């Protein structure tokens, strides 16, 4: 009886630890290279299941053409993000369902919305 209780307790503990690790928050990043010929003024990166765009991750900075910028994404449960960039003319470039754990972005005029 004691052995059965010990096995059940150990199995329960294992399942608890496993479920906690599955739900754990992760840190990700995405490198965005601007090959549009225009300066990127705003960059929004939101979890794919978000209903709105989050804050502009560039803040007071810009991403000049020919440059690459890294966006750190800390404390998320999924590596799937939607990304929108806005250039100096107000043109937008939107990328849906980007898996940042496997993909970086190279933005060109062909990606314009």
Image: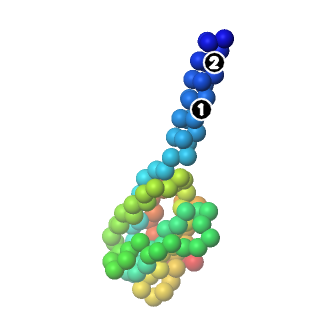
Q: In this view, does 49 lie above or below 35?
A: above
Residue 86 location, x and y as percent? 47, 80
Colour scheme in the image?
Answer: rainbow
Camera-nearest residue between 104 and 74: 74
The number of numbered discs placed on residues in the rendered structure image is: 2
Residue 50 location, x and y as percent? 60, 66
Residue 110 visible in the shown view: no
Residue 41, labelled with which disc? Answer: none
Camera-nearest residue between 110 and 89: 89
- Name the residue that disc number 2 marks: 5
Residue 2 visible in the shown view: yes
- Quadrant where the N terminus sits is top right
- Quadrant where the C terminus sits is bottom right
Residue 41 location, x and y as percent? 40, 81
Which mark is first along the chain, 2 or 1? 2
Q: In this view, does 93 lie to the left or right of 4?
A: left
Q: Counting other residues with Cα less than 10 Å from the Cα at mark 1, is it few (<14), some (14-19), or many (20 or more)?
A: few
Camera-nearest residue between 41 and 27: 27
Q: What element carries label 2?
A: helix
Asked whether disc 1 touches disc 2, contact meaning CB atoms under 8 Å apart, the reply is no
- Name the residue that disc number 1 marks: 15
In percent of the image, x 58 and y 39: which residue is there? 19
In percent of the image, x 44 and y 75: which residue is there? 56
Residue 20 location, x and y as percent? 54, 41
Foreground mark, 1 or 2, reads 2
**Rounded to the nearest whole Å, what is the CA distance between mark 1 and mark 2?**
15 Å
Q: What element carries label 1?
A: helix
């Amino acid at each position: 009886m004691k052995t059965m209780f010990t096995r059940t307790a150990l199995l329960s503990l294992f399942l608890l630890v496993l479920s906690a690790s599955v739900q754990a928050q992760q840190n990700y990043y995405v490198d965005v290279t601007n090959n549009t010929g225009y300066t990127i003024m705003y960059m929004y990166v939101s979890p794919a299941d978000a209903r709105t765009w989050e804050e502009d991750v560039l803040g007071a900075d810009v991403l000049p053409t020919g440059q690459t910028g890294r966006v750190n994404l800390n404390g998320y449960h999924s590596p799937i993000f939607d990304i929108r960039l806005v250039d100096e003319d107000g043109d937008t470039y939107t990328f849906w369902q980007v898996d940042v754990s496997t993909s970086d972005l190279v933005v060109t005029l062909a990606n314009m919305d």
